[in-house]
Amino acid sequence: MASRQAHARERDAARLTPLAALLVAGCAGAPSPMLPASEVAGELATLGWWLLAIASAVVVGMTVLVLVPLRWRAESLEETPVSRRGGPRGIAVGVGVTALVLAGIFLSTLVTLNDTAEPPREPDVTIEIVGHQWWWEVRYLGPDSSVVATTANEFHVPVGEPVRLIVGSADVIHSLWVPRLHGKIDLIPGRSNHFWLQADRPGRYRGQCAEYCGMQHAHMELYVEAVPPPDFRAWLERVSGPAPEPEDPLARRGRAVFMNRECVTCHTIRGTDARGERGPDLTHFASRETLAAGMYPNDRAHLTSWVVDATGLKPGARMPEMALEPEALHAVVAYLQSLR
Ligand code: CUA
């Protein structure tokens, strides 16, 4: 009996877990502008709440103004002379109040825009972000604007320091949005837009492309990892270096396969002959937690499926199918997983 009860409890728990997981995922760490993690995002959230309050007050006010007179006017309208039903004075009051509310919204938006446009101090870190269908190329620039490190879809920033962003696009218009850190900035082909971010608390912040850019727009995510400044410098130092030499014989075989296939025409792995520029830089690929711009966990199973048939996992993705013998596939995956 006891065991049957335990079994039922287990079954209920199993049924609940996915729902609970969904709820938790929906709240904790949700990429919501209403959960600001920076001063600027806080100002934007405050403005958002005010606009919501004003809009709600307008809706309630309008509803009252329409419904209340209707009730008694239905009875008294017949006797009320036309000249006393509102008239020019009523119109003037309506236009005046509307203009006042709109002017208030316009001015407070302008003030917030002005307050959040520039970082509090000159940033030490500059990151160039290029939007692609459907992933993010991320390059760290040195003081002389040379590229010191390149990664994709996930990048680190130092906590409590402003970071300058220079954003552009390789194909169509995208929009970078990390809701808990700042507002949106468009990535436009043929021009560079300047923006900045600062995370005041350590954490992993989810971002999303916020401008429809084709089939996989919804699966164009990015992650900003905010870490203490010393950890950030150590991370940048590490990812600035060439790819680690694979120690495992299988991974070494995988490297040979990779270098002899069309992989090298699209991907760069620094320290090797792979210098393609169409796809993401894979130099430290295994240190990224997700695959396909945040769509899947970066584990062996998903990586294997991705190499064989990327469009099966992400329809429309530009990565071609790779016809590899099982042994070669196994080796390539081992090599990619060694790129930490
Ligand atoms: Cu990129 Cu939507």
Image: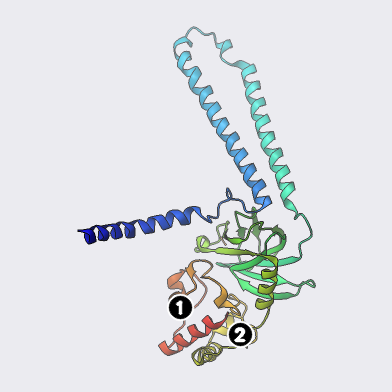
Q: Is mark 2 within 8 Å of ligand 1?
A: no
- Describe residue 190's horizontal placement relative to residue 56 as left or right: right
Crowd band around label 2 with a 10 angstrom C-alpha radius: few (<14), some (14–19), many (20+): some
Residue at image mark 2: 244
For the residue labelled by badge 2, is the local secondary structure a helix, a strand or a loop?
Answer: loop
Q: Which mark is residue 24?
A: none
- Describe residue 268's horizontal placement relative to residue 73 as left or right: right
Q: Which of 146 and 277 is in front in this view?
A: 146
For the residue labelled by badge 1, is the local secondary structure a helix, a strand or a loop?
Answer: helix
Q: Residue furthest top?
A: 79
Crowd band around label 1 with a 10 angstrom C-alpha radius: few (<14), some (14–19), many (20+): some
Q: Which of 3 and 313 is in front in this view?
A: 3
- Residue 190 image-quadrant placement: bottom right
Residue at image mark 1: 300
Instruction: Tell me the amino acid under the disc marked 2.
Output: Pro
In whole angstroms, how far apart are the C-alphas of marks 2 and 1?
A: 19 Å
Q: In this view, does 139 lie above or below 63?
A: below
Residue 313 picture location, percent across and down: 44, 71
